[in-house]
Amino acid sequence: MVDILHRVGIKSSVDAVYKALTTREGLAAWWTGNTQGDPGAGGALTFRFSVDGVEIGGFDMKVLELEPARSVLWQVVDGPAEWIGTRIRFDLQQSGEHAIVLFKHQGWKYPVEFMHHCSTKWAIYLMSLKSLVETGKGTPNPNDPHISGDGAD
Amino acid sequence: MVDILHRVGIKSSVDAVYKALTTREGLAAWWTGNTQGDPGAGGALTFRFSVDGVEIGGFDMKVLELEPARSVLWQVVDGPAEWIGTRIRFDLQQSGEHAIVLFKHQGWKYPVEFMHHCSTKWAIYLMSLKSLVETGKGTPNPNDPHISGDGAD
């Protein structure tokens, strides 16, 4: 099992970051505009992504655990084969003026090329989360930078 | 052992990317302006980073292997304790109009918080490499975005 790991410090309260991770409006403003479902504990979330106006796929998540202002844990229940069964975890901690976000996408079976891509892409989306919370404006899909060079995103 | 993995597609030839990874001028234009040493096979490279005009540290690397237009492998010989002995590898492959860069920072002993930070930061520097090669302008240190929230960078 291999994991994708990231960390960003966001000049804000942990509460503001937690809200961006646990509301449909928040998620839609940094990850993907096409976010649907229930971000509450036990809820089901669907995230869909588009490139040039064409939907290219996405992920269905179950919200496994929520600890207000502390942590968010999702399990992937549908999407690309490599993602199914993996878990995505955000741990929050206040450090002075900054909310520190420790991010983990855990449980990849193999370090495939697609995992490399997703690692880079997660970093970019976490910078979008940081921008959203600090400035009010993120760059969620379809306004995210394309990085793959193969039309995937 | 745990690894940091990333992937970017750069609209260019692999030769142009290889040049940005194996010349002092190239490295200084996407990773850190304070790049010194010999980027040739067997050479020693020093990379130093500054925040607000103050040097905060850096890394000394040995160039272990170079395969023109294919791969670059460095070993960290000095720097933060967690980095010493780790290896940084860039594998290049042409895919149509894009040079695909597979990046690995291999051999971390433990998935410490600092590793999470370095993973995010590598993604940002690889986007700087992409920007340099595609547009002629990267965002090397000290012009890189600060992401840590603790003054580290």
Image (cartoon, coloured by chain):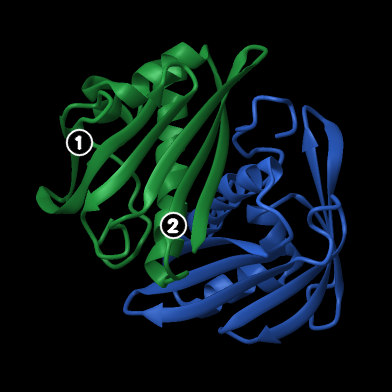
Chain colours: A blue, B green
Estimate how packed mark 2 is, as few (under 14), some (14 to 19) or many (20 or more) residues with alpha carbons within 10 Å.
some
SS under mark 2: strand
Residue A15: mark in rendering: none
Looking at the rendered structure, which numbered label has been put on residue B107?
2
Give the letter of the chain under mark 1: B
Q: Is label 1 or label 2 in front?
A: 2
Give the residue at x 51% y 56%.
B3
Mark 1 / mark 2, whichever is N-terminal: 1
Relative to A126, residue A98 above or below:
below
- Closer to us: B122 or B19: B19
Around disc 1, counting alpha carbons within 10 Å, would you say few (fewer than 14), some (14 to 19), or many (20 or more)?
Answer: many
Indicate left or right for B123 with A114 as reference: left
* Residue with the mark numbered 1: B45
Q: Give the percent coordinates (x, y) of residue A43.
A: 86, 77
Res B139 visible: no
Query: Which quadrant would residue A54 be assigned to in this image?
Result: top right
Horizontal and vertical percent position of residue B108:
42, 61
Residue type pointed to by label 1: Leu
Q: Quadrant of residue B21?
A: top left
Which residue does the image show at 28% across and 26% down from the upper left? B41
Q: Residue furthest left?
A: B54
Q: Is residue A120 visible?
A: yes
